[in-house]
Image (cartoon, rainbow, N blue to C red):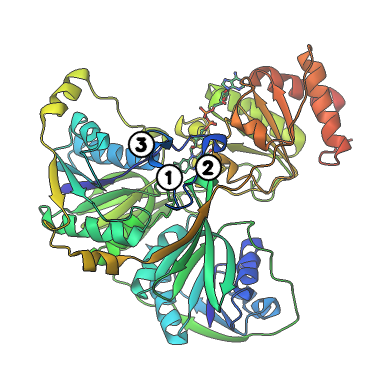
């Protein structure tokens, strides 16, 4: 049995179900968020769906880890697959440890060799790929967004059962939740204008917002720009930020470190704007412009404004 | 409260892909590929520990690092920034690519240190990118863990921590002893430290514990291993960049817009 842990049935979840299909075993789904998607899980290859009610947000990752530990044990799961994101980052290693298994993070491919899974994961910010096998099962794997073909809807059905979230000891307690930053969602955007350290100041990000507005897109940022305090953390694109797949990704004043590129592999076209003609970003770009970013942004705003 | 920061030095993470290589035999990049530096999230973790000490929440900060060979720069740096103690687990024979084995070493060292109540780790070290060690340490010590923290304050008998989560920033209460993994934030840029402190740090001792000192047998370390590397390689990157140049910036920008329209990637609103 392969257990897939999901919070909804969005694109990342369907990719996880697609990946589960590669392991040639029966698939069960644990839904820790939206219960409405339980029935639908069957259509994507799961034979069993477990819906948990109760509060998962109130205890950090504790309740989710406890629930998945219990269920994976009960099902005798060989592997637990999770979409890789800011939530599962803390869940996967701890779940693996409680199950006496192995966590494999940042998985980008799965092959069966003599019936045994070989996991390919990325390392060195995406500069290396590593094939690994696990010494102890179950494997708890986090799957990189965009790496697996999403499961197709087949019209199957899953038996749905409901369980309650296990009680946890209260060592961690949610006190407050702050609203995410405003602005168009990066994951759904067709156009992203992303700024890096080259922008030089917070004001330049206001201009990027105007540009994004004119293009009907969203604003992104490199880690260096977030570290500088010019953009909020949930605008960060890359290995430890969002993985995006717009039609056009403008990388403005971004050097193109592998960890940043790890977030934009799904873009149909990258447009690099950088004063340094040797910046690594040009190797990953479809179009390149060697120009001062402020000149570029202002000129683009002007031309788009006059076009409307 | 005694805080221990788990540090790691990694290959310069900004080394461009064009200069990156893998030694096929060793299944990892060669050691001489570039300088080893304190990873960015480890720097953030160290800064958070020092800020907690400045705020009086923490009374003592120990920097702990597992690495083979000579004492590492990261520990000198930690001492120069006024960490109270620096400890190296001389990890000969351990494999930095296996997070479970690294956690085993660190757990043994943490057990030997004077009752650490707060363990801070970077969210992910930028070499093998596992993002596991902090959490494995928490599990093996039976401690609660909160991931992706970028701010912490005292709140009665617990800590109030701010962390990144999919639905926006969460504030959580956590009662020490606990493990936090730390992510980047504008407020967590590692301080510089003074020249005087740097000079003084060169004279401060670094405690070095061998695997034997920690009571870990080679068999025990081998048993802690979880991952077998089959193969490591550097994927090819495609180069297909069309550089748009010219003398007039406005013209270049116009060309970019029209190329994107030709490629059917952009349509200007009517
Ligand atoms: C484990 C790990 C995870 C990471 N995760 C991420 C991540 O998710 N996202 C991320 O972005 N980074 C991440 N990083 C950091 C990454 O390695 C780089 O440090 C970061 O991406 C650099 O950001 P930058 O390109 O904005 O800055 P820099 O590398 O400083 O580049 C700035 C660029 O701007 C150009 N420039 C300067 N002035 C101008 C001008 N006037 N006009 C135009 N161009 C100009 C420069 O030529 C340069 O190329 C991670 C690192 C590690 C170790």
Is A67 in front, or is A58? A67
Q: Mark 3 Cα within 10 Å, few/some/many (few <14, many 20+)?
A: some
Q: Relative to residue B80, is residue A81 drawn left or right?
A: right
Query: Residue A223's spot in the image, x, y percent?
Result: 50, 37
Residue on which the image places disc 2: A259
Q: Is mark 2 within 8 Å of ligand 1?
A: yes
- Chain letter of disc 3 in the image: B
Residue on which the image places disc 1: B126
Query: Residue B207's spot in the image, x, y percent?
Result: 12, 43
Q: Is mark 1 within 8 Å of ligand 1?
A: yes
Query: Residue at point 15% right, 27% down?
Result: B202
> Is the residue under label 1 in contact with that under label 2 (CB below 8 Å)?
yes
State the quadrant of the C terminus of chain B.
top right
Asked if A73 appears above or below A22 in the picture, the reply is below
Q: Spatial distance from mark 1 to mark 3, Cα to Cα?
A: 11 Å
Query: Residue at point 68% right, 76% down?
Result: A44
Task: Say whether mark 1 and mark 2 are on the same chain.
Answer: no
Task: Say whether mark 3 and mark 2 are on the same chain.
Answer: no
Outermost residue, front side: B25
Asked if A119 appears above or below A262 in the picture, the reply is below
> Is the residue under label 3 in contact with that under label 1 (CB below 8 Å)?
no
Residue on which the image places disc 3: B36
Q: Which one is closest to the eye, mark 2 or mark 3?
A: 3
Task: Say whether mark 3 and mark 1 are on the same chain.
Answer: yes
Query: Residue A75's spot in the image, x, y percent?
Result: 47, 85
Task: Classify mark 1: helix, strand or loop.
Answer: loop
């Amino acid at each position: 049995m392969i257990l897939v842990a999901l919070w909804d049935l969005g694109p990342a979840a369907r990719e996880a179900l697609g990946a589960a299909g590669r392991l040639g075993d029966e698939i069960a789904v644990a839904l820790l968020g939206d219960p409405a998607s339980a029935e639908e899980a069957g259509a994507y290859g799961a034979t069993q769906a477990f819906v948990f009610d109760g509060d998962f947000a109130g205890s950090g990752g504790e309740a989710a880890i406890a629930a998945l530990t219990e269920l994976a044990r009960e099902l005798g799961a060989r592997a637990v697959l999770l979409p890789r994101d800011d939530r599962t980052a803390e869940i996967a290693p701890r779940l693996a440890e409680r199950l006496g298994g192995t966590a494999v993070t940042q998985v980008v491919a799965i092959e069966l060799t003599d019936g045994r899974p070989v996991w390919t994961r990325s390392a060195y910010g995406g500069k290396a790929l590593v094939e690994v096998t696990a010494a102890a099962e179950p494997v708890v794997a986090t799957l990189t967004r965009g790496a697996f073909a999403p499961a197709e809807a087949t019209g199957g059905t899953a038996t749905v059962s409901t369980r309650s979230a296990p009680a946890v000891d209260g060592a961690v307690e949610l006190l407050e939740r702050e609203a995410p930053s405003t602005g168009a969602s990066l994951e759904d955007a067709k156009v992203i204008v992303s700024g890096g350290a080259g922008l030089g100041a917070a004001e330049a990000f206001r201009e990027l917002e105007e540009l994004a507005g004119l293009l009907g897109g969203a604003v992104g940022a490199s880690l260096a720009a977030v570290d500088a305090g010019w953009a909020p953390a949930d605008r960060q694109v890359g290995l430890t930020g969002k993985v995006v797949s717009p039609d056009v990704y403008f990388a403005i004043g971004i050097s193109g470190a592998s960890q940043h590129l790890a977030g934009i592999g799904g873009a149909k076209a990258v447009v690099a704007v950088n004063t340094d003609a040797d910046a690594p970003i040009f190797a990953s770009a479809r179009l390149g412009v060697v120009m001062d970013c402020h000149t570029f942004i202002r000129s683009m705003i002007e031309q788009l404004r006059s076009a409307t | 409260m005694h805080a221990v920061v788990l540090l790691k030095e990694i290959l310069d993470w900004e080394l461009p892909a064009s200069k990156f290589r893998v030694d096929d035999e060793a299944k990892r990049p060669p050691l001489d590929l570039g300088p080893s530096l304190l990873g960015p999230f480890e720097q953030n973790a160290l800064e958070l520990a020092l800020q907690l000490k400045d705020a009086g929440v923490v009374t003592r900060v120990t920097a702990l690092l597992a690495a083979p060979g000579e004492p590492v720069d990261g520990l000198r740096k930690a001492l120069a920034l006024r960490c109270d103690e620096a400890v190296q687990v001389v990890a000969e024979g351990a494999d930095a690519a296996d997070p479970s084995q690294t956690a085993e070493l660190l757990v043994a060292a943490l057990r030997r240190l004077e009752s650490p109540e707060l363990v801070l780790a970077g969210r992910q070290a930028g070499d093998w990118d596992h993002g596991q060690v902090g959490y494995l340490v928490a599990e093996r010590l039976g401690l609660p863990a909160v991931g992706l923290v970028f701010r912490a304050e005292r709140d009665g008998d617990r800590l109030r921590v701010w962390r990144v989560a999919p639905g926006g920033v969460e504030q959580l209460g956590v009662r020490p002893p606990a493990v936090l993994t730390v992510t980047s934030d504008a407020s967590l840029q590692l301080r510089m430290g003074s020249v005087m402190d740097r000079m003084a740090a060169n004279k401060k001792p670094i405690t070095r514990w061998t695997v034997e000192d920690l009571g870990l047998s080679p068999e025990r370390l081998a048993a802690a291993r979880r991952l077998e590397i089959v193969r490591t390689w550097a994927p090819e990157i495609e180069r297909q960049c069309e550089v748009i140049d010219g003398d007039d910036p406005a013209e270049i920008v116009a060309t970019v817009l029209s190329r994107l329209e030709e490629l059917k990637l952009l349509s200007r609103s009517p």
